[in-house]
Amino acid sequence: MPIRVTVWGENVHDQENDVVKGIYPNGMHNTIADFLRKDPEIICKTAILQQEEHGLTEEILEATDVLTWWGHCAHKQVVDEVVNRVQQRILQGMGLIVLHSGHFSKIFGKMLGTTCSLQWREAGETERVWVCNPGHPITKGIKRYFEVPQSEMYGEPFQVPTPEENIFISWFEGGEVFRSGLCYKRGNGKIFYFRPGHETFPVYYNSTVQKVISNSVYWVNSEIDVDSWKGKMERKIPIEPIKTQDEK
Amino acid sequence: MPIRVTVWGENVHDQENDVVKGIYPNGMHNTIADFLRKDPEIICKTAILQQEEHGLTEEILEATDVLTWWGHCAHKQVVDEVVNRVQQRILQGMGLIVLHSGHFSKIFGKMLGTTCSLQWREAGETERVWVCNPGHPITKGIKRYFEVPQSEMYGEPFQVPTPEENIFISWFEGGEVFRSGLCYKRGNGKIFYFRPGHETFPVYYNSTVQKVISNSVYWVNSEIDVDSWKGKMERKIPIEPIKTQDEK
Amino acid sequence: MPIRVTVWGENVHDQENDVVKGIYPNGMHNTIADFLRKDPEIICKTAILQQEEHGLTEEILEATDVLTWWGHCAHKQVVDEVVNRVQQRILQGMGLIVLHSGHFSKIFGKMLGTTCSLQWREAGETERVWVCNPGHPITKGIKRYFEVPQSEMYGEPFQVPTPEENIFISWFEGGEVFRSGLCYKRGNGKIFYFRPGHETFPVYYNSTVQKVISNSVYWVNSEIDVDSWKGKMERKIPIEPIKTQDEK
Amino acid sequence: MPIRVTVWGENVHDQENDVVKGIYPNGMHNTIADFLRKDPEIICKTAILQQEEHGLTEEILEATDVLTWWGHCAHKQVVDEVVNRVQQRILQGMGLIVLHSGHFSKIFGKMLGTTCSLQWREAGETERVWVCNPGHPITKGIKRYFEVPQSEMYGEPFQVPTPEENIFISWFEGGEVFRSGLCYKRGNGKIFYFRPGHETFPVYYNSTVQKVISNSVYWVNSEIDVDSWKGKMERKIPIEPIKTQDEK
């Protein structure tokens, strides 16, 4: 059974900014989908903000095992109804991979409950990404560290709950450091935050960045087996007899 | 410095239901505030749904170290603006104690990111609450277990993220079990969920229940020391020089 | 690639106690191995205390993906050299399933760092095991709860670090409760503690108990991919030039 | 009630190495104790490897609320009996602060269950320590980052269990990064690992390093309230009647 991935893209910079158009002429979401499709175990579709229901209807989410999320300038345009639907699907077991500026997406904040804020600088500086967890499936095939030659800087404090696993730490040429690969589980769903990736730099063509995203698709994917009772609040009949107050 | 507690009450059953009025003639929030006030280290105010901004204005929250939350039938009437404000204050360091049916409050779900659903039955059955963590400050002075003679049953699965500490597990006469004392930290704020407490039973007069709530006030209380930069997303200047692409 | 399981048994009660011999004539380890072997995806061997190096040589551990551990009266007879070897293999990625009285084994205490003590009673009472995490792979195919008609009681407090996931909670006829299915990760290795199982009761013939153990074999199994640098302390040459104190 | 701190020092380099003697003429343990003693809320004693029972007798541990640990070349000389005694006291509630090369101490490995290995280089390079958790009591009064002008490098992967909180991340002039402030709880005891500090550099005279260690003394300190039943394995009588198999 192949993994069914939906790559979600905000697709605003990709349409409006000439630098971004030059780097990602088909939009970042298509660049991401293209490299994932090279894996025969992955079936990959895309969805964008501008589609009806942002391309994330009930039917599409039900047919999605793993959702990747990239957004930046239009987080607020994502309607709450869709965000709630994505949340429910994650809790059922859909994997979520949040990329770069998706740290401020409604869905990431909703799943984690914190501001997810950070420090930043856009200066085209080098990012060196260090592996903290070399035995983790997400770092399979990755060496001690890899470099992204031009990156937007994200710096600590990254205001998120303590992750269940910390996979990468980035250092930036200008001096800052950042926890750039974080694992969470919420309900049945696994969540991976991966920092690298910026619209004005060709980060999603970097083969190591691609390898990490591919690895993380496998990691967040779960077999979902939702019985009717599992997610529901239900009134239950007692298993054992209950005494009245007089009998006690 | 005494701890400044605000006891929040939904105050709907307390006004409308004769059974509840009989047990809590001044409302559950006043019953809770009354026993907390016996501690000279605690200064306790109350706030209710029906007040302007639900009694949780900026000024009141800024003067609150610990907020306790009881709600049941009117969770949806709590306006999002107030919920967001409470969330921000928790992330700054205010403690939150969520009581019983507050598991379905907007603020608890917002902090945790999951459905917080559970199984239930209202049959006046005995609840036996077992201590899992006898050295924890919340269980100070509590024996191996204590009993609540009449309780609403809550049963697993309790759909919350894995707690950082599990303080109590309840067993119910009808057969179910439930993780009934859970600790979380989000941002600088500590959160404690405590299960016992129901509007139609005199649970908040139980001296052991009172002891646990008092202990948890101390535990969730933190010294807050918010510098200007801490919660904010800021653009930062580099510490080290950044090379241009030509220089690299 | 099938999963290579080694079922380790202390094999002392099984040889010396007539009740145990009556229930497990080939030893508990063979009963466990027998039901695991029904799964064509699993290749299962056994190892016992009485073998040289307790049957856990370097070669055998290197050919083991998942180790299950049952011990009770002879924990101290397990030599430290073998315990250390098992620990190293877990840190590399071997899964460990600790059964019942294995809570006091050297290997479990060594991995967790706490006493792992608990309360107990041997009275042949009913154990009702509740599912806390219905979407977890370990509970696949398990209903809301299952019962073991005759069990040794284990009661809280169970003195272990907070688990990463709490899968089951048991209630016992005599009144106590216990966290009876706990998940940990240490290094690359996953660890599952599963409470049911006692030498004087036929617990390992219970089909639901068997189902849980089979499920957990899959869950603790990991693909191990140990590069030479991963587990080792190494002196590293700098990537960037380091200034002398005079240059600073 | 002041906090009773015992500063433990290996005291080998301090006696044998002229560079170390030049920097820490009274031994590192006395340098650490000296700055802690400036706080009137702290009562501070020292203990060293060369004393009987390494200065950590039952009596001394019972009168210790917080133990700090520095060791490097003589970890193996610490006898297991003392290590076990320290572990028991931590589980009861004594705080432990592990400094720098103490990552390879017997007590740290025993509490965490992993190798605690890392990468390293001794080149006198700059260490920049970034705050990840600005609202935490351990970072009170600490700015965004601080620098140690000459440090031994420690690099990821640091093979420890996921910490409950990650307080600091260090970057080193030669390029590596490291999680340099980690929080754990085991039993009733809090544990803080703090990376900076090396025998051939005057790190423990750095006022920010001193501030962090002082803050962490407060954080790991707990009120201990050990009842007789808490740490013990006990056979319990049933609370509810247990049916015989015939009655079921």
Image (cartoon, coloured by chain):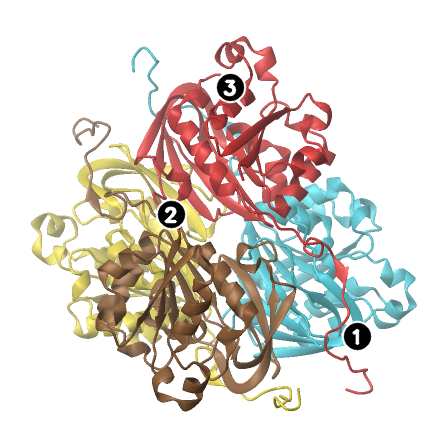
Chain colours: A yellow, B brown, C cyan, D red
Q: Residue at the location (29% across, 78% down)?
A: B76
| Residue A197 visible in this rendered orientation of the protein | yes
Q: CA distance from mark 3 to mark 2?
A: 34 Å
Q: Residue at the location (42% across, 28% down)?
A: D209
A132 vs C3, left or right, is left
Between C18 and A139, the one lying in front of the other is: C18
Residue type highlighted by circle 2: Glu
User: Tags 3 and 2 in contact by the CB under 8 Å rule?
Assistant: no
Q: Position of residue C160 (x, y in %)?
A: 62, 54
Q: Nearer the viewer, mark 2 or mark 1?
A: 2
Q: Position of residue D109 (x, y in %)?
A: 61, 39
- Which mark, by number, is residue A210? none
C84 vs A54, left or right, is right
| Residue A46 visible in this rendered orientation of the protein | no
Mark 1 chain: C
Q: Do tags 1 and 3 sit on the same chain?
A: no
Query: Residue at label 3?
Result: D199
Between B85 and D146, the one lying in front of the other is: B85
Q: Residue at the location (78% across, 49% down)?
A: C55
Q: The C terminus of chain A lies in which quarter of the figure?
A: bottom right
Residue type highlighted by circle 3: Glu
Which element type, helix, strand or loop, lies under badge 3?
A: loop
State whether residue A50 is above or below residue D232. Answer: below
Between C40 and B65, the one lying in front of the other is: B65
- Which mark, by number, is residue B223? 2
State whether residue A80 is above or below residue B189. Answer: below
Query: Residue at label 1?
Result: C124
B202 vs A57, left or right, is right
User: Tags 1 and 3 in contact by the CB under 8 Å rule?
Assistant: no
Q: CA distance from mark 1 to mark 3?
A: 59 Å
